[in-house]
Amino acid sequence: MNIDEMVRAARPEPPAGWAQSSDGQRVLDDVLTTRRAATVRSRPAARRLVLAALVPVAAAAVAGVLVLGQSGQPAPFPTGTNGPAPEAAPKTARELLLVAAERSATAAADGRYWLVVREHGELRQLGPAKRPYHMLLRLQDEQWQPTRAADTSLVFFQRLAATPVTAADRAAWQADGSPTRWTDGGVAVEGAAGPRTRRHIDQPNRSRTYPLGGTSLTAAQLEALPTDPAALRSWLLKLFKDVGISEPVDYALFWSGRHLVFDLPVSPGVRAAAYRMLADVKGVTLLGPATDRHGRPGLAITYTRVGDNGKTGQTSLIIDPRTGQALAEEDRTAGELTRYTILLRTGYTNEVPVR
C-alpha cells in the first residue's frame, strides 16, 4: 500500500466542518504524505518536483506564532538572553548553514519512535465582500513513526482556532460578529477549535515511504543516503534526472535539502550533509534575525524565484543557530505570507503516544 492509499484508508470518517471540505481534505492528504505543492508555479506537461508548504492546521494564538514585520519579512531578532550574541551570529546564509550542520550532527539518532509535531497555517481572506478580513486557519499534526516492527504508526490531528492576522483584521472580524464558520466559494470553512483525532496507519514502518526529490523513499533508503555533501548533491542530481524533474537545479536542490533538514527521519550525518550541501546552493540568502510563531528566536534564510505565472515566490527557513534545528518554514507570494509550517518537536524518542 502506498502513501496515497494509506491516506484514503486513514480517514473514512472525516470530521465535520472545514476538515470535511475540499480544502480540509487536501490538508489531511498533505500532512499524511508530507507533500509540498509549489505556491508560485503552474503545471507543465513535464513532471515537476513536488514542492512547497502545507495548508492550514493548528493554532495557538496570533501572538504565539511567527512574528512578521511591516514589510512581510521576519521581525527583528529579540534582544536579551534568548538569542545568540550579535557578534556570534552568522553573517551569511552559508555561515549559518555550516553552523547548523556542525550543531545538528550531534543529535540523538535512536529511539522507539520518530516523532514529528507540526503546526501548519494558511492565510485566507474571508468575511463579507465589502469588508473582508484575513484569518489564519491552522491545524496541528503529530506523527509517531515506529522503529520496531511490533509498534504501529499513529497520526493525530487537531484543528485549532482560526485567528485574525492583524489588528485591522480583528476589528473587521469583530464587526462581522466574530464568526468561526464561513462559506468561501460555496465551501464551508471551519475556524473553531476541534478535538484531537487519531488515525491509524496500518503499515509496517520499514515499508512506509517519504517524499523526496519528486519521488518517495523508504526508511531504509533514507538511512542509506550519503553523509558527504558532495556525494549527497550528486545522488540528488541523479534522482532529479531519473524522475524527470524540470525545475532549475538550484531550486530543486534547495527544496530537497530543506526537506532533509526539516522533518524527514534521517540520521544526524545525513542532516548535516544536507545543511552543508545547502550552503553551496546558489540563490540561498540570509534574511536575518526572526522568531517563529511560538516566539522561538533564530535566523532566517530564503530562496526566491519567479514562478511560471510571473509572480515572485519566496520560501524561508528559520533556523536556531545554537542547535542547528530548523524551527519553521514559510511561503510568500509577492511578499505576502501565504502559508507556514512550524516544527514544534522532532526527533527520536522512547516515549509512547498518549492515545
Image (cartoon, grey):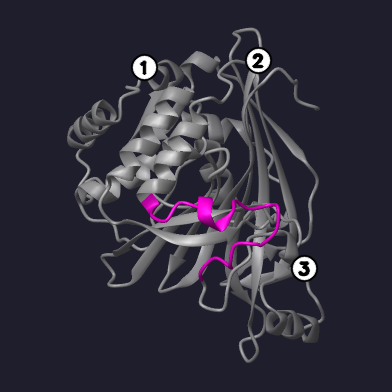
The residue tagged 1 is 224
User: Image check: 203 left or right of 58?
Assistant: left
In the rendered image, residue 323 lying in the magenta stretch gets the answer no
- Residue 227, visible in the rendered structure: yes
Q: Can you say which quadrant of the picture contains the C terminus?
A: top right
- Residue 220 vertical placement versus 79 (above, below): above
Q: Quadrant of residue 290?
A: bottom right
Which residue: 66% across, 58% down?
293
What separation in Å lies between label 3 and label 2 (alpha carbons)? 39 Å
What separation in Å lies between label 2 and label 1 (alpha carbons)? 20 Å
Question: Magenta stretch mostly in which secondary structure?
Answer: loop
Q: Quadrant of residue 192?
A: bottom right
Rendering coords of residue 110 (x, y %): 59, 15
Kindly identify the amino acid type of the residue bearing the numbered disc 3. Thr
Which circle, 3 or 2, is nearer the viewer? 2
Rendering coords of residue 174 (x, y %): 80, 82
Under tag 3, what secondary structure? loop
Rendering coords of residue 242 (x, y %): 19, 31
In the rendered image, residue 92 lying in the magenta stretch gets the answer yes
Reading the chain from its start, which is encountered first: label 3 or label 2?
Answer: 2
Kindly identify the amino acid type of the residue bearing the numbered disc 1. Ala
Magenta residues span 73-93
Q: In the image shown, does 112 or 211 lie closer to the viewer?
A: 112
The residue tagged 2 is 112
Reading the chain from its start, which is encountered first: label 2 or label 1?
Answer: 2
The residue tagged 3 is 180
Total count of labels: 3
User: Image check: 216 left or right of 289?
Assistant: left
